[in-house]
Amino acid sequence: MRPLKLDRILSAESELQPLLAKAHDLRVLSGLVHCFLSADGVGEARVVNFKDSQLVLAAPNSAAAAKLKLLAPALARFLTERRWQVSSVSVRVQPSTAHPAPRSRRDVQLSTSALEALHNLHASMRPSAARQALGRLLQRRGGRREKDG
């Protein structure tokens, strides 16, 4: 049997719909921002977040951040013309490595509150492949695993 695609599994879960909608919005915004910035020769800027009409970008270095800050008003207008309600654009310097080192599973730590939220989500989900995957994640993190129903 062919494995289910991740997007199909996730879209079947009503609890995950807000997350999927946000991811879709960020993907669309990233494409528009890339289109706008490629015309101005700005390097590897990334969309980090979009919330309350504020777009947050990450620049790879301070020079790119300075250029992005100068272009921010024009970028906001560009996005507004494409029916995105962007009132401000903020820029952070966030260096990225061209070839990130492989990460081991053990270097990611979830806070107690994050684990509790994931346990609550797991408990509220109906039996599904997404619920099973979340259960396995929680089990690997050393947390209690509620029985898949």
Image (spheres, rainbow, N blue to C red):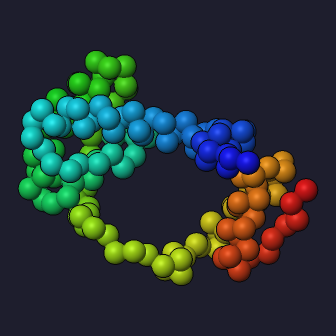
Q: Residue at x 20, y 58 (%)?
A: 60
6 sits left or right of 55 in the view: right
Q: Count the marks: how many?
A: 0
Taking depth in this image into account, of 89 and 11 the one nearest to the observer is: 11
141 sits left or right of 55 in the view: right
Q: Residue at x 71, y 60 (%)?
A: 133
The residue most toward the right is: 149
Q: Residue at x 59, y 73 (%)?
A: 111
35 sits left or right of 53 in the view: left
> Residue 140's quadrant in the figure?
bottom right
The residue most toward the front is: 1
Taking depth in this image into account, of 106 and 55 the one nearest to the observer is: 106
Look at the image and tell me in which quarter the C terminus lies.
bottom right
Position above or below: 54 against 63? above
Taking depth in this image into account, of 148 and 16 the one nearest to the observer is: 148
**Residue 122 visible from this viewpoint:** yes
> Residue 61's quadrant in the figure?
bottom left
Horizontal and vertical percent position of residue 130? 72, 52
Q: Residue at x 37, y 19 (%)?
A: 83
Position above or below: 66 against 148? above
**Residue 87 visible from this viewpoint:** no
Taking depth in this image into account, of 139 and 143 the one nearest to the observer is: 139
> Residue 63's quadrant in the figure?
bottom left
Position above or below: 116 against 84? below
Horizontal and vertical percent position of residue 121? 74, 55
Position above or below: 109 against 60? below
Horizontal and vertical percent position of residue 66? 11, 50
